[in-house]
Image (spheres, rainbow, N blue to C red):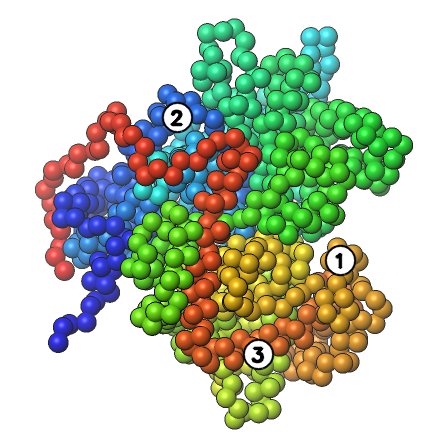
């Protein structure tokens, strides 16, 4: 009988993890020891686990350096059109494993660390997440960087190097407590500061109009210091750059004003300037009109545009020899993509640079600017749309406000010319909203100032054209496009679920990693019992691993044979965690009533952070969920075959552990409210079935999963009993509608009465009364309207789960339909249809010799490896 394979041996067999050649391993060990000695300045007697992580990170990083320099050299020489992805968020997560995956170093590093007596997974777990994002929008930017590099685009991500990313969430007595995310405390081995490229950014001041042009004077200057992070493509030798700006006070900051308190106070006040890049605003789909946030938005834009213009001028087209740069070539050499309206100031800033600084006539500058910029819309929720008060603008960026007024004046002229006398249309389309407080509508600015406007899933793009931006669509229909979101299969399959990746690779080879459409070849194995068994086994292993993780870290014990039912995403009314809660209560009541029935055991896990601005209601949702999971306060528990867990501090790293373990993915937003969703795609790719509304990308996922009813779904959006209603109305519906649901659905009534009566919070019977009153009287998102369909659909899920083979076959159908949801497909479409560049999925563009050779391993005594 052969010995069962250890975890380590099992991993070595997995080919998608790269080959562990003897030479590679020996080199890695040498370099690891060299970094421990020279970079960390430690020996193995005193080194900590964190030192070992850093030594490994530096060892892996060395493999990026030559490729990074060579790629940038190549761009300089070939001068292709550059793509600039501007985003206030890059939700990157960890970097070490991703780098090893993309460079095919994972197995070799695993072997090297193993031979050194270390556990690579344990070291990987020491890395902090780069949590510079809130949720979907920030993670999309991160997936796009991976795909742009993997497709060989000359692309850059530009954003802010927040000193504190998204807060860490602790649950204390059922309530969310936020902790600062001090992610840079131990240093960041993946970034390289570039102080030599520091750029000035101006604020405040006033505008002077002279015969020879406009001057913005008496400004305050803050310096923008760039930090570069390498972005490797998947096994193609390309390494692009993500450049994040950090705010730095100039040396003379406040020193000119001798009356403000002297030298000491001036030095202390440097913080005021440097606060700009201190912290990420933790709002997801919500606009908070704070001055510091507007400063952040302009800061990233102003610094980035200086880079873009400098790089353009230094290129052949910019032609240094000729006296004047030919800016008419800019749209042929540069594409700027705005990730939502957050970097919208790029439009007036580019105009300011071209008109005020480069002295171009307005019309010429405007034509260049529009052809360079493109805008992606991410939401239709009115509370999320950025509308900045004019007063704030006037104070902080007086020249930009003038430029926006001039853009609007010309825009209004065009509206008037096309729709003479339609005053109401002009009011609706203005960049300036009238009212008690005048505001700049940033979405309108972006539409007018871009040559392409896109939504992020087909239904969302259709809603933009039909409702939110209807007037703009009628004026310029050709501007409007769709680019359905995607996720990178490197992080969200190969990296987080190597078991599944391997089982797939055994059947269809490894090329699906760069060409996800190939997953449809799995349909050839839909009746292959061995394949069905392999897929089911991988899921079971992932569930066990996650159960062990929860036990080790949170001391909760869950049943790995129960259905893992997950809803992980930001907590939001429109995402309807409360609909999930109503199902939980209903299921629990049924089990109590009929304890001997053959109920499908479920572990329901809900996780997500609460936006800090509107904590009251959302926080109570968290509290409700956590109390059920709590051994003392929980009414709903394992004894009744249903257990509720709140997953604390949901973030990229937790997503990577939880999603591969999921059986059921909850995607139940009110139809018309979730622009796309990307969590939905991660679950689908990792072999979970979806229960979802026909919203966002769910619609296209159901389509791609093929003819079979692979998607368990209800309709959502209040369809059914009362017909379909718009979700953007006042949300009150016909009078008495919600009472009608309550009175006609006995199980709903029972659940609501229990919540209202303090059944789930006996010590504080009134705790959830505002949840009750919201659901009963002013729910904008129609939870009651979908309750009945949702419960019925969950019943079907339970039935299907009782037949493991049928379940797994549907899972395989789902995985086979995932091709469309690779961000490689999304980026190829942006490239061809918006940016005018051609993606190049070739494996290895011609390799040139690096300027410097790879650093040679140093010989030194005193550092010896320890054999296990
Ligand atoms: C993918 C992802 C999201 C987005 O999830 P949705 O369900 O699409 O809202 C949010 N947070 C994290 C950590 C993610 O990885």
What is the C-alpha distance between the residues marked 1 and 3? 28 Å
Q: Earlier in the sequence, mark 2 or mark 3?
A: 2
Q: Secondary structure beneath disc 1? A: loop
The C terminus, quarter of image: bottom left
Picture coordinates of residue 48 (x, y %)? 26, 53
Picture coordinates of residue 302 (x, y %)? 57, 28
Disc ID at residue 726 = 1
- Residue 858 vertical position relative to residue 808 in the rendered view, above or below: above
Could you tell me if the residues under marks 2 and 3 are in contact, i.e. CB atoms within 8 Å?
no
What is the C-alpha distance between the residues marked 2 and 1? 48 Å
Q: Earlier in the sequence, mark 2 or mark 1?
A: 2
Q: Secondary structure beneath disc 3? A: helix
- Name which quarter of the figure residue 861 lies in: top left
The residue indicated by pointer 2 is 75
- Name which quarter of the figure residue 529 lies in: bottom left
Residue placed furthest toward the right:
421
| Residue 188 appears in view | yes
The residue indicated by pointer 3 is 795
Q: Earlier in the sequence, mark 1 or mark 3?
A: 1
- Residue nearer the viewer, 727 or 136: 727
Q: Name the residue at 75% across, 55% down.
A: 728
Point out the frontmost of discs 2 and 3: 3
- Residue nearer the viewer, 359 or 123: 359
């Amino acid at each position: 009988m052969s010995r069962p394979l250890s975890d380590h041996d099992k991993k070595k067999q997995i080919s998608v993890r790269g080959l562990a050649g003897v030479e590679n391993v020996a080199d890695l060990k040498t370099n690891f020891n060299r970094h421990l000695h020279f970079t960390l300045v430690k020996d193995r007697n005193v080194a900590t686990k964190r030192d070992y992580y850093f030594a490994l990170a530096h060892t892996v990083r060395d493999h990026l350096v030559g490729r990074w320099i060579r790629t940038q050299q190549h761009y300089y020489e070939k001068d292709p059109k550059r793509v600039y992805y501007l985003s206030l968020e890059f939700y990157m997560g960890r970097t070490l494993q991703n780098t090893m995956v993309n460079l095919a170093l994972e197995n070799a590093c695993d072997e090297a660390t193993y031979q050194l007596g270390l556990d690579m997974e344990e070291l990987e777990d020491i890395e902090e997440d780069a949590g510079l994002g809130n949720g979907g929008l920030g993670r999309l930017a991160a997936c796009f960087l991976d795909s742009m590099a993997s497709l060989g685009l000359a692309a850059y991500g530009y954003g802010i190097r927040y000193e504190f990313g998204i807060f860490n969430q602790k649950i204390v007595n059922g309530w969310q407590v936020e902790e600062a995310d001090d992610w840079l405390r131990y240093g960041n081995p993946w970034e390289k500061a570039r102080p030599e490229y520091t750029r000035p950014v101006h604020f405040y001041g006033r505008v002077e109009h002279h015969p020879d042009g406009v001057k913005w004077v008496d400004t305050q200057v803050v310096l923008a210091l760039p930090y570069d992070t390498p972005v490797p493509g998947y096994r193609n030798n390309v390494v692009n750059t993500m450049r994040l700006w950090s705010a730095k006070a100039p040396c003379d900051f406040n020193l000119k004003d001798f009356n403000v308190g002297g030298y000491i106070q001036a030095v202390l006040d440097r913080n005021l300037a440097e606060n700009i890049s201190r912290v990420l605003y933790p709002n997801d789909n919500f606009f908070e009109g704070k001055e510091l946030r507007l400063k952040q938005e302009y800061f990233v834009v102003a610094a980035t545009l200086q880079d873009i213009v400098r790089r353009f001028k230094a290129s052949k087209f910019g032609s240094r020899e000729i006296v004047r740069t030919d800016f008419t070539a800019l749209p042929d050499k540069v594409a700027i993509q705005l990730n939502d309206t957050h970097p919208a100031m790029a439009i007036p800033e580019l105009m300011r640079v071209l008109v005020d600084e480069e002295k171009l006539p307005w019309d010429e500058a405007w034509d260049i600017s529009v052809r360079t910029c493109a805008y992606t819309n991410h939401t239709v929720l009115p509370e999320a749309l950025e509308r900045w008060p004019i007063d704030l603008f006037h104070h902080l960026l007086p020249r930009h406000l003038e430029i926006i007024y001039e853009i609007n004046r010309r825009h209004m002229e065009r509206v008037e010319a096309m729709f003479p006398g339609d005053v109401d249309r002009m009011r609706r389309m203005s960049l300036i909203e009238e009212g008690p407080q005048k505001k700049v509508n940033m979405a309108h600015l972006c539409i007018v100032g871009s040559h392409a406007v896109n939504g992020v899933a087909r239904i969302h793009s259709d809603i933009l054209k039909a409702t939110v931006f209807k007037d703009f669509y009628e004026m310029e229909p050709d501007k409007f496009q769709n680019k359905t979101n995607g996720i990178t299969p490197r992080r969200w399959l190969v990296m987080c679920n190597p078991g599944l990746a391997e089982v797939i690779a055994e059947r269809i080879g490894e090329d699906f990693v760069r060409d996800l459409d190939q997953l449809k070849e799995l349909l050839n194995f839909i009746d292959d019992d061995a394949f069905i068994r392999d897929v089911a086994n991988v899921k079971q292993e992932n569930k066990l691993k996650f159960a062990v993780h929860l036990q080790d870290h949170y001391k909760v014990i869950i049943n790995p044979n129960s259905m893992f039912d997950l809803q992980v995403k930001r907590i939001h009314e429109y995402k309807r965690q409360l609909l999930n809660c109503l199902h939980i209560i209903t299921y629990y009541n049924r089990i109590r009533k009929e304890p001997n029935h053959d109920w499908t055991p479920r572990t329901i896990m809900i996780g997500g952070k609460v936006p800090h601005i509107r904590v009251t209601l959302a926080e109570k949702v968290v509290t409700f969920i956590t109390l059920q999971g709590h051994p003392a306060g929980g009414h709903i528990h394992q004894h009744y075959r249903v257990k509720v867990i709140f997953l604390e501090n949901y973030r990229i790293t937790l997503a990577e552990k939880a999603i591969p373990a999921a059986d059921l993915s909850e995607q139940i937003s009110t139809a018309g409210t979730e622009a796309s969703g990307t969590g939905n795609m991660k679950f689908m790719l990792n072999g979970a079935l979806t229960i979802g509304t026909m919203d966002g990308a769910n619609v296209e996922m159901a389509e791609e999963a093929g003819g079979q009813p692979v998607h368990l779904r209800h309709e959502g959006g209040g369809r059914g009993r009362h017909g379909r209603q718009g979700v953007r109305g006042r949300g009150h519906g016909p009078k008495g509608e919600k009472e009608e649901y309550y009175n006609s659905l006995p199980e709903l009534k029972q659940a609501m009465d229990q919540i209202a009566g303090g059944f789930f919070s006996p010590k504080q019977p009134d705790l959830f009364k505002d949840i009750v009153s919201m659901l009963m009287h002013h729910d904008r998102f129609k939870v009651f309207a979908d309750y009945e369909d949702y419960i019925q659909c969950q019943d079907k899920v339970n039935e299907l789960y009782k037949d493991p083979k049928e379940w797994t076959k549907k899972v395989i159908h789902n995985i086979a339909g995932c091709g469309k949801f690779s961000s490689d497909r999304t980026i190829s479409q942006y490239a061809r249809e918006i940016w005018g560049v051609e993606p190049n999925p070739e494996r290895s563009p011609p390799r040139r010799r690096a300027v410097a050779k790879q650093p040679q391993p140093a010989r030194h005594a005193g550092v010896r490896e320890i054999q296990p």
